[in-house]
Amino acid sequence: MELNQLLERITDEIAPLRGAGSVADYIPALARVDPSRFGIAVADLDGGVHGTGDWEIPFSVQSISKVFTLALVLADSDDVLWQRVGREPSGSPFNSLVQLEHERGIPRNPFINAGALIVTDQLISLVGDASTELLALLRAESGNADLRVDDEVAGSEAAHADRNLALTHFMASYGNMRNPVATVLDQYFRQCSIAMSCRDLALAGLFLAAHGLRRDGSSMLTSRQAKRINAIMLTCGTYDAAGEFAYRVGVPGKSGVGGGILAIIPGRCSIAVWSPGLDKRGNSVAGVAALDHFTTLTGWSIF
Ligand code: DON
C-alpha cells in the first residue's frame, strides 16, 4: 500500500477517537485548542514527507522539545550530563517530585520535567540562549525558517509554574543546578512553547532515524548516540505509560501535552502525529492509536 493511502486509512480508522481524552488545562493557553484536530506525517530517509489531516497546522511541541535539547547537549559531550541525570524509566508522572528526594536531586531520566530542566541548564551553560539554539536546529532540519516560540503559551506556562518551580528549586538545593532557577525556567518554557506542525516535526526528528545524520548529510550525533537517544525515548519517552506504548506501538516515541508524539523507526523514517485529547498519563489518545495502526499495518515495529 502507498504511504499516502496508508495514512488516509489510519486517519479514517482513528476518526472515532478524535476529541477523546481531555486537553491539557494546567497550562491555560493549551486548553483553547480544538480537541478534534488530528494530523500525521511521515518523513523518510530520502527526505520525502507525506501527511494527512491537520498535518500542516502548528501545535505546541511541549515535552517533545526534550528530545532535541538532549541531542544538542549530547552532541557536545556525553560525560558531564550523565553525572547529573539518570537514564532509567521513572514509572512516575512527568512532573512528579517523589523520587527526587530519595535520589538526592538527581532526576531519573532526561524526559521527565526534572531531568529536562537539568538538560536545559546544561545547554544554557554551553550556549547561553538555549531556546534560540534549539530553534536554529529545528528550523534547519524542518526547512521551516518561520518556526517560532509561541509567546502566549510561554507566558501561560510561566504564570502557572508552581510545580516546575518546586522541581527546579529542589534540585538547586542539592547543588544540581548551574544557572539561576529563573533563567533555566524561562528557557525551558520557551523551548516547550515552540509551535511546529507534524510536517516540521517529522523532518526535524529524522536525524534519529538516520543514525545521527542531519538532512544535509553532516553529523549531528554519532550512530551510537542516536541509538542511545532512541533507547531513552523507548523506555522513558511516554513516562509512566512507556511500557504500554512499547506494547502497543513498539518504537521509540516522545509525547508532549500539546497532543503531539514524535516516533522514530531507526533506519526507516520518523513519524509525527498530533491530536490534543490526552489520556490520564498525558499522551494523545488518537495519536497513540494512530501509531499502533501504523506499526501494525507496516510491520515496522522494532519488535
Ligand atoms: O513543563 C511542563 O509541564 C510542560 N511544559 C511540558 C509537559 C509535557 O509535555 C509532558 N508530556 N507529556
Image (spheres, rainbow, N blue to C red):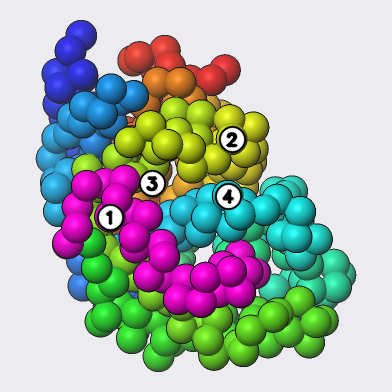
Tag on residue 75?
A: 4
Nearer to us: label 4 or label 3: 4
Please state the horizontal and vertical placement of residue 44, each as a whole percent of the image.
30, 25
Q: Of callouts 4 and 2, which one flags the residue occurring earlier in the amino acid sequence?
A: 4
Measured in 3D between alpha carbons, the distance from the residue under mark 1 to the one under mark 2, in whole angstroms, is: 21 Å
Q: In the rendered view of the protein, which quadrant contains the N terminus? A: top left
Q: Is residue 29 above or below residue 58?
A: below
Which label sits on residue 139? 1
Question: Type of residue at label 1?
Answer: Arg
Q: What whole-number distance in Å separates the C-alpha atoms at marks 4 and 3?
A: 23 Å
Q: Are marks 1 and 2 in contact (CB under 8 Å)?
A: no
Secondary structure at badge 2 equals: loop
Tell whether position 132 is magenta.
Answer: yes
Mark 2 surroundings: few (<14), some (14-19) or many (≥20) residues within 10 A? some
Residue 280 percent across, percent down from the top left: 48, 57
Identify residue for label 3: 261
What is the distance, in whole Å, between disc 4 and disc 2 at their CAs?
A: 8 Å
Q: Which span is picked out in magenta?
A: 118-146
Front of the two marks 1 and 3? 1
Residue shown at 49% from the left, 42% from the top? 220
**Category of crowding for the residue at label 3, using alpha-carbon neighbours closer than 10 angstroms: few (below 14), some (14–19), many (at least 20):** many
Kindly identify which residue carries mark 2.
222
Marked residue nearer the N-terminal end (1 or 3):
1
Residue plotted at (14% across, 48% down): 56
Choose the circle earlier in sequence order: 2 or 3. 2
Residue 122 quadrant: bottom right
Relative vertical location of residue 255 with respect to residue 263 in this rendering, above or below = below
Check disc 1 and report its element: helix, strand or loop: helix
Q: Nearer the viewer, residue 80 or 105?
A: 80
